[in-house]
Image: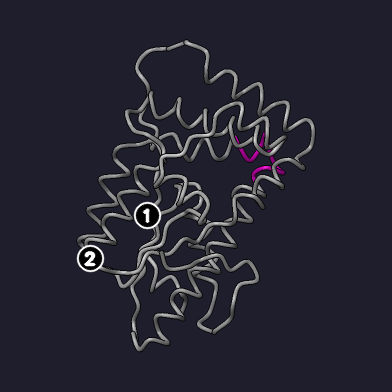
Amino acid sequence: MSYLRYVRLIGTMHVSPKSREEVIRTILNEKPHAVAIELDRARFLAMNENRRMTFEDALRFGRKGLINYALAKVEEKLGEEFGMKPGEEMKAAISAAQALGVPLYLIDEDINVILSKIAAAPGREKLLMALEALGIFLPVRLGEPSDPMAEYRLMMVQFQRRYPYLYRVLVEERNEVMARNLISIVENLRLRGIKKPKVIAVVGLGHKPGIEHILDRAKERRFRSPYWTAGVV
């Protein structure tokens, strides 16, 4: 049997109000033994404290800071377009876990590791990313915006074609990290005497198929991830 029978993944679009509603409804209805979210400790603390990096802060942190600042601004712009701030679905998962009194786990890779990998991207991909990010801020509207959830899968395919290195770093490698952390969570729950643990994980829609594939292929056996980052909040 695979680990997928213990884990239900909710794939969300980080700037979609529909995702927030689905997260709340699913967690409260399913009543899992644990909730896991696509955050690491640094991003979790920053989100709860509503910390926002300024451009001056980014300059002090150098190349990593500027990359982080640019990505945050892109998400902010998308949030304005679709009516929800980035991270609202993660806050909904946190609140739902607290309401049920179940442990909350942070399963994503450390943000500093991710930023280091992004900084090492090929020059072509960095330039293309900068140009496309600039386009997001241009005040051009071509009719009403489409449903972001319906177009997300196509966006991921296009992203993989244009940015093979960044796709591997931002999607595939993080899928592996999060899947291994979820397996460790399941095993920890079983060690506590829960024979059939139920874990709900809230991740970006682009991560859902890859993580499910890894969990489905992983046979039930105990091992610790070399990338272990999950921890009870």
Where does residue 4 sit, x and y in percent of width and height?
43, 70
Compared to residue 69, the image places residue 181 above or below, namely below
- Residue located beneath label 1 in the image: 10
Q: Please give the name of the residue rendered at 52% of the width and 28% of the height, measured from the top-left corner.
A: 73
Majority secondary structure of magenta residues: helix
Compared to residue 22, the image places residue 215 above or below, namely below
- Residues at marks 2 and 1, CA–CA distance in whole angstroms: 18 Å
**Quadrant into which the N terminus falls:** bottom left
Disc number for residue 100: 2
Where does residue 201 sit, x and y in percent of width and height?
40, 60
- In the rendered image, residue 197 lying in the magenta stretch gets the answer no
Say which of 101 and 169 sits in front. 101
Q: Looking at the picture, which amino acid does disc 2 mark? A: Leu
* Among the 4 quarters of the image, the one containing residue 47: top left
Q: Secondary structure at mark 2?
A: helix
Instruction: Locate residue 33 relative to residue 168 in the image: left or right.
Output: left
Q: Secondary structure at mark 1?
A: strand
